[in-house]
Amino acid sequence: MATDLALEALRRALVLEKEGIKFYGDAAQKVQDVATRQMFATLANDEKQHQKMLMAQVRSLRENKGWRKYPAAEEAACLAGAPSLFPKDKAALDRISQTSTDIDALRFGLTIENRSFEFYFKAAHDSESSEGRSMYAFLAETERGHFDMLMMRLEGIIGPLGWTY
């Protein structure tokens, strides 16, 4: 039963990563800003690495070998705090009046990274395995880093959120 629940969580995680790979790969081809294009290509590659980690975990559980250990995941932070990355004044994102593809892509990226973080945060807390908790915490922290990168890039293009020019 626990393995079935773990496999279902991993299946959902794989869907998130697949969506991220597709979105960031497509966005890297479409945005105009060179730095944003490079960042999207990097994020697509990161999501591919996450997908490989998750697929290996699925194989291990299906073969009754238990959870795989990942040294980098064992060092993940404890994920203190609320499971939401968006600033409290999320409405600031909605006030952006520009409609450029770059800004739209960054805003959508923020949404999917927030969703991924929340999923991995919950999965870390729900996992009955210390290895599973470590892996999910690692992935949540990585998604938090992606969110921060996207937010910094967005602020680099439009200025700090909430500021009026």
Image (cartoon, rainbow, N blue to C red):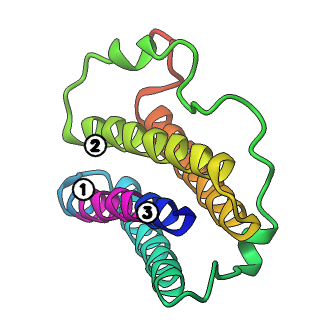
The front one of 1 and 137 is 1
Identify the amino acid type marked 3.
Leu
* Discs 1, 2 touching: Cβ within 8 Å: yes
Residue range in magenta is: 11-25
Name the chief secondary structure element in magenta. helix
Q: What element carries label 1?
A: helix
Identify the amino acid type marked 1.
Ala
**In the rendered structure, does residue 18 fall within the stretch colored magenta?**
yes
User: What percent of the width, then of the height, locates residue 27?
Assistant: 24, 56
Residue hosting label 1: 27
User: What percent of the width, then of the height, locates residue 45?
Assistant: 42, 73
The front one of 28 and 7 is 7
C-alpha gap between disc 3 and disc 1: 10 Å
Residue hosting label 2: 105
Q: Residue 43 carries which label?
A: 3
Please tell me whether residue 85 is drawn above or below residue 78 in the rendered image. Answer: above
Please tell me whether residue 70 is drawn above or below residue 8 in the rendered image. Answer: below
How many numbered callouts? Answer: 3
For image coordinates 53% across by 27% down, the residue present is 86
